[in-house]
Image (cartoon, rainbow, N blue to C red):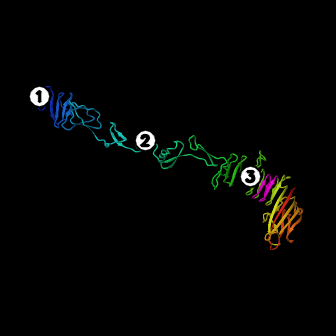
């Protein structure tokens, strides 16, 4: 036991018999130049702090007690000491404090606040020591920092709300915000054919039905393009040519106009000659025909150049308005051996002779070629308009020859009367020997309206 009565010097402290010293003063002996003393000595500061010497260096002093309520330990403090009632630990402290004071010590740790309110959180951030520095309760995926997930959308809700009673396969459709249902693609009779309409076994396949019936009343539009855009394609292709304003179809490896050219492959399947159609609304059927007259029809290797005319067979030529010409074979050129029919009509209201025409206005029968021989038979009938049963009928047979000149041309005819309501009515056939035309002249009665029809049948031979 130390003998404190050994000696005591105020300037040197209280020296005990085991050579330890008890000092007092206001300095901090663990800092600066320290305080020289044997190991185990005590230093009492005027602020109530008690230090103990633990090493040989003058600054080897350890704070072991404090008159205040707590001892503050920092990250740079490696000492251990006696603790009073409370230990305040900073956020950066990384050490274990073991009291040197004998006996049990109740330690109350006060952590410095982090700014986070106490509570339950689903997302937190921590510092390097594991302390929570921020906390939140997000309500979205983005709030949790998840960026590779599908964002919430009413369409996703609609899929999740699909009919629970329906199989979870097939095609779904959105019917409204957050609503959906299973659907199946179905066919329309004679319009489309549908395979795998629910998409379960394979992708739905929609095709046009055989012998399709197009719905609607307005019509449909076929592919449209210019002549340059017209390309080689399969026979049977249809398009509309915007340059010519005509429908076109593909036949025999060629593009043809609807209502103009038709190739009859049964006649010449190897190398058919395409017909020529230039007349408005004209039609040519067969090989090598020509239809140049308006509303004309050429059947076979024939030519219909007169308006409203029809040529039939091999080598016939219809040059007059409304003429129907037919032939089996020409001698040398078109029209050189043929028969023909001509129809005239007109009306009289006076007793003066008038000429009748093929179109009722101005068109006559024409024989344009020199050296044309024609035998004709004209049937004439007239009927009074305002009185039923009054008639005129006759037949005029004859021969017409158009020579190389007018003087070489001639006309002969014979008339047969069948029925006359009035003796002063008449019908006659004349010819324009210069121009090679037939003229049909009729005479009615004053104050009476008569309608006349004349049919002339001919056989024609051209040298």
Whole-percent x and y of residue 170?
54, 43
Closer to the eye: label 1 or 2: 2
Above or below: residue 143 compared with residue 4: below
In the rendered image, which quarter contains the C terminus? bottom right
Numbered disc 2: secondary structure:
loop
How far, Cα to Cα, is label 2 from label 3?
Answer: 71 Å
Numbered disc 3: secondary structure:
strand
Query: Is the C-beta separation of discs 1 and 3 under 8 Å?
Result: no
Quadrant for residue 413, please give it: bottom right
Above or below: residue 244 compared with residue 69: below
Say which residue appears at 72% left-offset and 48% top-offset: 251
The residue carrying mark 2 is 146
Whole-percent x and y of residue 221?
64, 53
Tell me which segment is drawn in magenta: 294-314
- Disc nearer the start of the sequence (2/3): 2
How far, Cα to Cα, is label 1 from label 3?
Answer: 145 Å
How far, Cα to Cα, is label 1 from label 2?
Answer: 75 Å
Queried whether the magenta region covers residue 250, the answer comes back as no
Q: Nearer the viewer, residue 56 or 460?
A: 460
- Which disc, if any, is residue 4? 1
Numbered disc 1: secondary structure:
loop
Q: Nearer the viewer, residue 245 or 269?
A: 269
Query: Is the C-beta separation of discs 1 and 2 under 8 Å?
Result: no
- Disc nearer the start of the sequence (1/3): 1
The residue carrying mark 3 is 261
């Amino acid at each position: 036991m130390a003998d404190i009565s050994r000696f005591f010097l105020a300037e040197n402290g209280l020296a005990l018999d085991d050579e330890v010293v008890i000092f007092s003063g206001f300095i901090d002996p663990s800092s600066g130049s320290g305080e020289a003393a044997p190991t185990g000595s005590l230093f009492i500061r005027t602020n109530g702090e008690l230090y103990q010497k633990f090493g040989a260096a003058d600054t080897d002093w350890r704070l072991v007690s404090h008159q205040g309520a707590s001892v503050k330990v920092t990250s740079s403090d490696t000492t251990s000491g006696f603790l009073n009632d409370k230990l305040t630990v900073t956020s950066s402290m990384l050490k274990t404090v073991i009291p040197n004071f004998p006996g049990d010590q109740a330690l109350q740790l006060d952590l410095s606040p982090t700014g986070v309110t106490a509570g339950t959180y689903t997302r937190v951030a921590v510092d390097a020591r594991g302390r929570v520095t921020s906390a939140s309760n997000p309500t979205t995926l983005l709030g949790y920092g998840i960026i590779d997930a599908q964002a919430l959308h009413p369409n996703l809700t609609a899929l999740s709300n699909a009919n629970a009673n329906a199989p979870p396969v097939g095609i779904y459709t959105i019917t409204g915000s957050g609503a959906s249902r299973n659907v199946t693609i179905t066919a329309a009779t004679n319009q489309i054919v549908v395979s795998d309409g629910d998409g379960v076994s394979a992708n739905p396949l929609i095709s046009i039905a055989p012998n399709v019936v197009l719905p609607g009343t307005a019509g449909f539009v076929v592919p449209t393009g210019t002549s340059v855009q017209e390309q080689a394609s399969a026979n049977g292709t249809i398009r509309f040519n915007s340059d010519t304003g005509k429908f076109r179809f593909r036949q025999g490896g060629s593009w043809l106009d609807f209502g103009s050219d038709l190739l009859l492959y049964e006649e010449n399947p190897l190398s058919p000659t395409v017909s020529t159609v230039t007349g408005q609304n004209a039609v040519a059927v067969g090989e090598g025909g020509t239809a140049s007259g308006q509303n004309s029809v050429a059947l076979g290797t024939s030519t219909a150049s007169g308006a409203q005319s029809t040529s039939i067979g091999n080598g016939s030529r219809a040059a007059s308005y409304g003429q129907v010409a037919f032939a089996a074979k020409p001698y040398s050129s078109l029209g050189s051996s043929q028969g023909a029919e001509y129809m005239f009509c007109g009306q009289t209201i006076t007793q003066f002779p008038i000429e009748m025409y093929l179109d009722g206005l101005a068109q006559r029968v024409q024989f344009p070629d020199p050296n044309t021989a024609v035998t004709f038979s004209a049937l004439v009938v007239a009927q009074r308009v305002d009185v039923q049963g009054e008639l005129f009928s006759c037949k005029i047979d004859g021969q017409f020859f158009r020579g190389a000149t007018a003087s070489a041309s001639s006309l002969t005819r014979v008339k047969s009367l069948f029925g006359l309501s009035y003796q002063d009515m008449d019908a006659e056939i004349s010819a324009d020997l210069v121009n090679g035309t037939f003229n049909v002249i009729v005479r009615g009665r004053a104050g009476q309206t008569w309608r006349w029809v004349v049919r002339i049948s001919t056989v024609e031979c051209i040298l």
